[in-house]
Amino acid sequence: MKINTKYFGEMDYEANEIITFPAGLFGFEDENEYLLIRFDNEDDTLLALQSVKTPYLSFITLNPFRVMPDYEPYVSDEDLEFLDVNNQENVAIYTIAVVGDEVKDTTVNLKAPLVINPETKKGRQVILEDPAYTCRHHFQSPVA
């Protein structure tokens, strides 16, 4: 199948690559199907969460553990049950970023990560209880 994307132009994809968010994402409840597309084929740090239905709707997404190794989100038992997994080690977690003109202006939503069952491709955006995590955490690029 083909899709027009915001950042990559027209691309081919397979139906089994679609990640389904039955409840949508916060503010985008009617958008339920997405593709996770790497900006770099060799690295899963920076990705686009591209709507299958709406070409211009794409979120810059990070693998938070690559850039913030101390990030320790706790996914509730209710959320794990919704995703059909037994424990947190069986999910993939991503965060949505708002990219600023400069890296110092970029923020990451650590409070409401995307949690995905990689086996079933079912996802949910969750809200973490931990007050240390905010919706606009200032991103700091890792030191090389």
Image: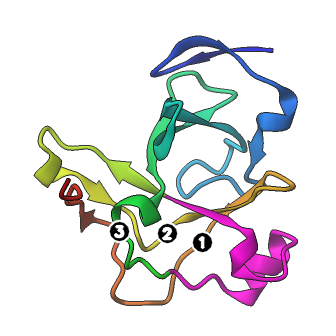
Range shown magenta: 73-94
Is the residue under label 3 in contact with that under label 1 (CB below 8 Å)? no
Position above or below: 135 against 102: below
Tell me how far mark 1 sits from mark 3, CA to CA.
19 Å
Percent of width and height locating residue 125:
61, 64
Q: Residue at x 82, y 73 (%)?
A: 82
Task: Please indicate whether residue 58 sits to the left or right of residue 119 in the image.
Answer: left
Q: Position of residue 56 (x, y in %)?
A: 50, 24
**Residue tagged 1:** 126
Q: Secondary structure at mark 1?
A: loop
Number of other residues with Cα within 10 Å of mark 2, as a class: few under 14, some 14 to 19, many 20 or more = many
Is residue 79 found inside the magenta-colored segment of the image? yes
How many residues crowd mark 1 within 10 Å: few (<14), some (14–19), many (20+)? some
Q: Nearer the viewer, mark 1 or mark 3?
A: 3
Going by the numbered disc 1, the residue's amino acid type is Val
Which numbered tag is attached to residue 68?
3
**Cβ–Cβ below 8 Å for labels 1 and 2?**
yes
Residue at the disc numbered 2 = 112
Placement of 35 over or under 136, stated as above or below: above
Determine the secondary structure under disc 2. loop
Q: Residue furthest front?
A: 144
Vertical comparison of 111 with 51: above or below: below
Residue occupying image coordinates x 48% and y 41%:
43
Identify residue type, mark 3: Met
User: Which quadrant of the rendered structure holds the N terminus?
Assistant: top right
Magenta-drawn stretch contains 47: no
The kind of residue on which mark 2 rests is Ala
Residue 31 in the image, given as x and y percentages of width and height: 67, 41
Label whose residue precedes the other's in the sequence (1 or 2): 2
